[in-house]
Amino acid sequence: MPAITSAQLSRRELLKLSLGASLALSTVGVTATLSGCSSSQPGRDMLVLRDTDLPIIAAIMPVLVGPHPALNDPANLQNAIRQLDTTLGWASTAVQKNVHELLDMLAMAITRGPLTGIWGSWETASSAQVLAFLQRWRDSRLDMLRQGHSALTQLLLMAWYATPASWDAAGYPGPPAI
């Protein structure tokens, strides 16, 4: 069978691909929940984020932000993660569920390796590996991966730029006092 390029993808093939991706995500979610890999309980001092989510976010956020001087202090990264948690705490239950499913997919070794190219733990992933994963998802032919990239980058960057530590390098004095 010849390789299918994006220009040759028929509507029927696209529907098959979408159905397959949906089934894969559903299977991952059910497997994670039933195997105990995914806890619905928030981590210590968190409203929404779980302990398994924190290493993923801690590995991705500095790569997304880039060489920001405030990231030299690990407390600023932790503050940004807390900001993300607070933001998710105000989000709908459906949004929280979708974020948990995305982070579950990134946390489980059986899906993390093939989907991200990071075969080890997030704690040992290099910045180059994380950057390659982000570029892979950003440029993917699969809409599911592009949407995952968009969700991750928007959430993490929004959380980072909501923290006062990020403002100095951008020359932003902060919101006006009311």
Image (cartoon, grey):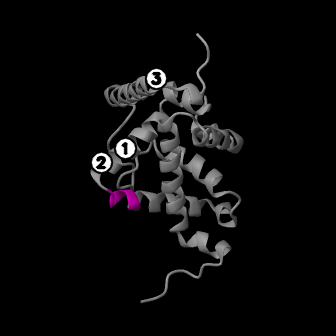
- Helix, strand or loop: magenta stretch: helix
For image coordinates 62% across by 31% down, the residue present is 117
Measure the alpha-carbon separation of dots 1 and 3: 25 Å
Which one is in front in this view, the residue at disc 3 or the one at disc 2? 3
The mark found on residue 15 in the picture is none
Q: Earlier in the sequence, mark 3 or mark 2?
A: 3
Q: Position of residue 91 (x, y in %)?
A: 33, 57
> Which disc is residue 98 wearing?
1
Q: Which of the 4 image quarters holds residue 14?
A: top left
Task: Tell which of 30 and 49 is nearer to you.
Answer: 30
Q: Quadrant of the C terminus?
A: bottom left
**Which amino acid type is shown beneath numbered disc 2?**
Ala
The residue sitting at 60% across, 26% down in the picture is 5
Instruction: Determine whether label 1 and label 2 are within 8 Å by CB.
Output: yes
Highlighted magenta segment, given as a residue range: 87-91
Reading the chain from its start, which is encountered first: label 1 or label 3? 3
* Disc 2: which residue: 94
Relative to 100, does residue 164 appear above or below in the rendering?
A: below
Q: Residue furthest bottom?
A: 178
Q: Nearer the viewer, residue 132 or 108?
A: 132
Q: Residue at x 46, y 62 (%)?
A: 83
Give the SS element for disc 3: helix
Q: Give the x, y percent position of residue 158.
A: 50, 62
Q: Which mark is residue 13?
A: 3
Give the alpha-carbon distance from disc 1 to disc 2, as whole Å. Answer: 6 Å
